[in-house]
Image (cartoon, grey):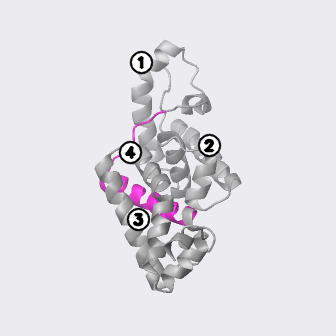
Amino acid sequence: MSVSLTKEKDSVLVKAYIDGCERSLAVLIERHKLKIYNFINSKVADRDISEDIFQDTFIKVIKTLRKGSYHEEGKFLPWVMRISHNLIIDHFRKSNRIPIFESKDEFDIFQIIGDDAPNIESNMIDKQVVEDLKKLIVELPEDQREVLTMRLYKDMSFKEIAEVTGVSINTALGRMRYAVINIRKLIEEHQIVLSA
């Protein structure tokens, strides 16, 4: 039985677990644990906290399945990723800490905002700008703040953001666009100078 379980689709395993087959949940966890754990660890960058969040994710999965509240057949992994993402957000809220800003690709907040200062000057003021931006990001609507935080602070692709938040890529892009527009407005309102 257990050998054949490893070949079953996620949706079949979920149904089997709901019907009382404990082994099917173990197969699901084994199948997806690396991707889920790596996703969590890439966001919190702490092994102990990552393990805690990973455990909490599957506790929530088990509770939801046992209650009969799971209605996303065929989308098990994105659903679990969303749960872990929400727990990561909760962790940052509780610790009152925003992850460190790192821009690792072509997407750069300074390009979007329109900082025309030369590179050397930019480097000198980056720290202050990041502090100012953190304060502004908190003022954004939650859906925009979520996408902006995932994109800028966690270096997630729009495809990943769409999967984790359960929206289309276009919606994620739209939220990012509005977040940037609102950040620009907030910069003007607060009269923040982004160049030396």
> Which residue is label 2 attached to?
181
Is 81 inside the magenta-drawn segment? yes
**155 with respect to 58 (left or right):** right
Q: Amino acid under label 4? A: Ile
Measured in 3D between alpha carbons, the distance from the residue under mark 4 to the one under mark 3, in whole angstroms, is 21 Å
Marks 3 and 2 close (CB-CB < 8 Å): no
Which numbered circle lies on residue 124? 1
Crowd rating for badge 3 (residues with CA inside 10 Å; few <14, some 14–19, many 20+): many
**43 or 179: which is nearer to us?**
43
Is 17 inside the magenta-drawn segment? no
Residue ID at (44%, 69%): 26
Residue ID at (62%, 55%): 162
> Which residue is label 3 attached to?
57
**Sequence-earlier tag: 4 or 3:** 3
**Sequence-earlier tag: 4 or 2:** 4
**56 or 106: which is nearer to us?**
56
> Which residue is label 4 attached to?
98
